[in-house]
Amino acid sequence: GHGSASSTERRPGENKGFVEEMRFVAMKLHTREQAPKEGEKKAEKVPEQKPMAQWQPTKEGYLNFLVESKAVYDAMEAIVASNADPMYKAFIDCGLERSEALDKDIEWFRETLEMEVPEAKGAGKEYAEFLKNLAKESPPRFLCHFYNVYFAHSAGGKMIGRKVSEMILDGKELEFYVWNKNGGLEKSLAEVKEKLNEAAEKWSREEKDVCLEETSKSFQLSGALLRLIA
Ligand code: HEM
């Protein structure tokens, strides 16, 4: 804003912490079609992702995406509940968990659409295995994936869910895109942001950079998951 900050105004940089750094790196990896910004130069393309306008989703592909996604969220949630590293405890029951919701959605496909539910044996299983190893090896790298997976899903993921549902599910709202724990999505995001900032405060600049560097790997692995819908 202009002039000096009043008690109700945000101080410059008040909400800036390490999450801002992670967000900045993530936004640079989006294509223009994914997250357009006026006046922005054409961003570098993530090769795994073609523009959503060209997607031709199917119910089978989408169910497969949900099943593979569940493997990833199961792993995330098991890791923070484990003692792979003491800093993960802060993220138990953070309100962003998606495993239970995915269970319900997958059951809906089975029950209502009478579809056969596949097993997770592709991109999601691979990502889950990767995370389990990484969690013990490098908390900064793991938390990069944690941030990107949960926050991407709350932003672009939500938009993708709405569009795909309009295309192939008559607009049915899936539980995957509904957050009602811990006071809802906005509150959970704000709390997790704060906890991530707190965790990163204990990191050296090198550890922070290692975390930021992991963003492209996160895009690569999540991109492979998203491709299951396209
Ligand atoms: C934010 C779209 C893939 C990570 C966003 C936003 C959009 C978007 C519209 C909000 C932009 C804003 O607030 O200015 C998409 C689309 C994707 C995609 C359409 C693929 C088709 C990904 C992937 C990742 C990712 C693969 C990483 C794994 C993020 C993050 C944010 C974000 C971390 C910031 C969220 C926040 O600040 O709360 N995305 N995205 N996105 N996306 Fe994506």
Image (tube, rainbow, N blue to C red):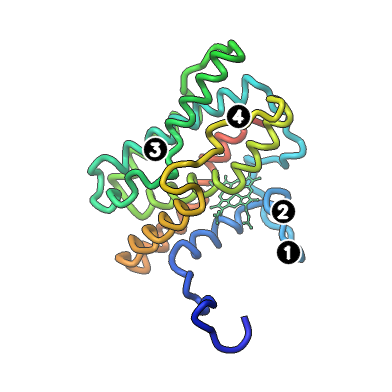
Ligand 1 closer than 8 Å to label 4 CB = no
SS category of the residue bearing label 1: loop
41 left or right of 108 in image: right
Instruction: Find the distance from the CA under tag 3 to the CA under tag 2.
Output: 29 Å
- Residue under label 3: 130
Q: Give whichever of discs 3 and 1 has the lower sequence position.
A: 1
Tell me the amino acid under the disc marked 3.
Phe
Q: Nearer the observer, disc 3 or disc 1?
A: 1
Nearest the viewer among 105 and 86 is 105
Q: Answer yes or no: do the residues labelled 3 and 2 have beta carbons within 8 Å?
A: no
Instruction: Find the distance from the CA under tag 4 to the CA under tag 3.
Output: 19 Å
Instruction: Find the distance from the CA under tag 3 to the CA under tag 1.
Output: 34 Å
- Residue under label 2: 32
Q: What percent of the width, then of the height, locates residue 100?
A: 43, 30
Query: Quadrant of the image for the C terminus?
Result: top right
Q: Give whichever of discs 4 and 2 has the lower sequence position.
A: 2
Q: Give whichever of discs 4 and 3 has the lower sequence position.
A: 3
Q: What percent of the width, then of the height, locates residue 96?
A: 44, 44
Nearest the viewer among 117 and 108 is 108
- Residue under label 1: 40
Tell me the amino acid under the disc marked 2.
Arg
Tell me the amino acid under the disc marked 4.
Leu
SS category of the residue bearing label 2: loop
112 left or right of 171 in image: left
Q: Give whichever of discs 2 and 1 has the lower sequence position.
A: 2
Q: What percent of the width, then of the height, locates residue 91?
A: 34, 49
Q: Name the residue: 23% across, 51% down.
A: 86
Q: Name the residue: 37% across, 69% down.
A: 205
